[in-house]
Image (cartoon, helix red, strand yellow):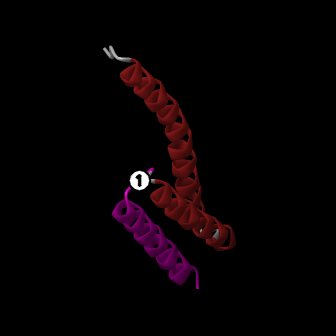
């Protein structure tokens, strides 16, 4: 338990950040999952837009420090790889 004023303030700040980050992380997961769902159901036009938006959100999350840069890069790579495979199979 925090005892000093500054430590108590730090705990309050951490809690606010935790709640904000939880919301952002949930939104990020939703966008990635939405893109994967479009890919799985062979909706290439919707998947194209969803993948583009998901990669943008991953980059933004990495910039804000929500996830690490390599984590974002790995997720983008895997997502685009799935998208390209689905697109090739559709043609």
Which quadrant is the C terminus positioned in?
bottom right
Q: Is residue 69 left or right of residue 47?
A: left
Query: Is 23 colored magenta in this rendering?
Result: no
From what the image shows, is residue 2 above or below residue 29?
above
Label 1: which secondary element = loop
Q: What is the x, y in percent for residue 58?
A: 50, 61
Identify the residue shown where x is 68% and y is 67%: 46
Identify the residue shown where x is 34% and y is 65%: 70
Which quadrant is the N terminus positioned in?
top left
Count of residue discs: 1
Quick one: 62 or 79, which is closer to the camera? 62
Q: What is the x, y in percent for residue 85?
A: 47, 77
Q: Is residue 45 left or right of residue 28?
A: right
From what the image shows, is residue 29 above or below residue 35?
above
Label 1 crowd (10 A; few <14 / some 14-19 / many >=20): some
Picture quadrant of residue 55: bottom right
Q: What is the x, y in percent for residue 21?
A: 50, 41
From what the image shows, is residue 59 above or below residue 27?
below
| Secondary structure mostly seen in the magenta stretch | helix
From what the image shows, is residue 59 above or below residue 17?
below
Q: Which residues are magenta?
A: 66-91
Q: Which residue is label 1 attached to?
A: 67
Q: Is residue 9 visible?
A: yes
Identify the residue shown where x is 36% and y is 60%: 71
Query: Is 75 colored magenta in this rendering?
Result: yes
Quick one: 46 or 27, which is closer to the camera? 27
Quick one: 83 or 86, which is closer to the camera? 83
Q: Is residue 15 left or right of residue 44?
A: left
Identify the residue shown where x is 55% and y is 45%: 24
Query: Residue furthest toward the front?
Result: 5
């Amino acid at each position: 338990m925090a005892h000093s004023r500054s430590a108590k303030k730090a705990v309050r700040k951490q809690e606010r950040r935790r709640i904000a980050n939880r919301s952002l992380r949930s939104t990020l997961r939703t966008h990635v999952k939405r893109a994967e769902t479009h890919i799985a159901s062979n909706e290439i036009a919707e998947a194209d837009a969803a993948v583009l938006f998901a990669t943008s959100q991953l980059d933004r999350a990495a910039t804000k420090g929500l996830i690490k840069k390599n984590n974002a890069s790995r997720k983008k790579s895997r997502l685009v790889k799935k998208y390209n495979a689905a697109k090739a199979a559709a043609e």
